[in-house]
Amino acid sequence: MSAPPELDLSTDVLALTRALVDAPSVSGSETALADAVEAALRALGGLEVERIGDTVLARTNLDRPGRVVLAGHLDTVPIADNVPSRLDETTGRLYGCGTSDMKAGDAVMLRLAATFGVPGAEPAHDLTFVFYDNEEVESVKNGLGRVARERRGWLYGDLAVLLEPTDGEIEAGCQGTLRAVLSTKGRRAHSARSWLGENAIHGLAGALAALAAYRPREVEIDGCTYREGLNAVGIAGGVAGNVIPDESSLTVNFRYAPDRDEDAAEAHVREVFAEAIAAGATLTVVDNAGGALPGLGEPAAAAFIAAVGRPARAKLGWTDVSRFAAFGIPAVNYGPGDPQLAHTREEHVLVERLQPAVDALTAYLSGSSS
């Protein structure tokens, strides 16, 4: 295990972003970076700090009338020859693994902690900072999920802000996501005598026709338009070039608006494929994660939008805001990174996006935004 880097929270957000990127933290290997974040937060002197595995929690306890939770994951996808970071001053781009997703957002959080987590600071809200591990891998390892199970009280607040990459825009709530497998059975036979068999791949024709005819729903919630989508994402079947296959399967992914819960999403998918199921296909749901309502009618969320000065748009994808929504807490995604660059070899963040994110959040958290 590498030695933890030293993080100087008094430096600017660009320097902090570079320091975070230069500390490799691929999912499952976040310990050194979590150690550094924990040490830096404890040194501020105005925060209660707790460690759960490689998740670092910190909060103020100033008896403010409201609380805002800020959260960001420390881990990245595997490095693609893009660490250490590289600053291109000509284009104003900072390159490196995690620059966009989401160490730029973590750096913004650390700058906010340095401002509001010291003795004598006067934020308008009590603040909770959550730096968590294992977001980029399977959900069972997710550090925020671990906090939800073991220290649920740390996640309560009037508003949650995930510093996920949104290119400086506010993305409210998130879609739900469901994956299901449609399976068909047939009877194996020699392809020269195909009438003696029953082709399982052909048995998927009804399901594919239902997908081709499907028209996704668009739903407006709190002024944000969520567009649903139901698509085939995988198909399997076949034995050999001269064999009628007796098994086949089709994997579908349903991205659904947050006005549906998990049960309603499954019921909708079963309705779409009702004819295929009646014809003998079986449908098995293998993953179903509910979305998050935007909750923009809540005063805290409305004040946040006013502070940033940008209209909110729907989050077309699933993020950990859903964990907060499960507790009835309005949650938004807002970060300086570009989501389209996440996980790419050329991942980078525009330097000009960094300080405005700090400024907007500082204005909101200090109560000085108009």
Image (spheres, grey):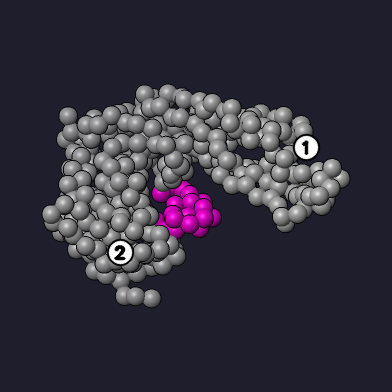
Amino acid under disc 1: Gly
Residue 82 appears left or right of 274: left
Q: Position of residue 187 (x, y in %)?
A: 82, 47
Pick whichever, 284 or 211, lies toward us. Answer: 211
Q: Which residue is mark 2?
A: 82
Q: Which quadrant is the N terminus positioned in?
A: bottom left
Q: Position of residue 306 (x, y in %)?
A: 24, 30
Outermost residue, front direction?
A: 192
Q: Quadrant of residue 166?
A: top left
Q: Position of residue 274 (x, y in %)?
A: 70, 30
Pick whichever, 367 or 191, lies toward us. Answer: 191
Residue 160 appears left or right of 112: right
Pick whichever, 316 or 10, lies toward us. Answer: 316
Outermost residue, right direction?
A: 196
Residue shown at the point (73%, 34%) measured from the top left = 277
| Magenta stretch holds residue 217 | no
Q: Which residue is mark 1?
A: 280
Amino acid under disc 2: Asn
Look at the image and give the residue range highlighted in magenta: 130-154
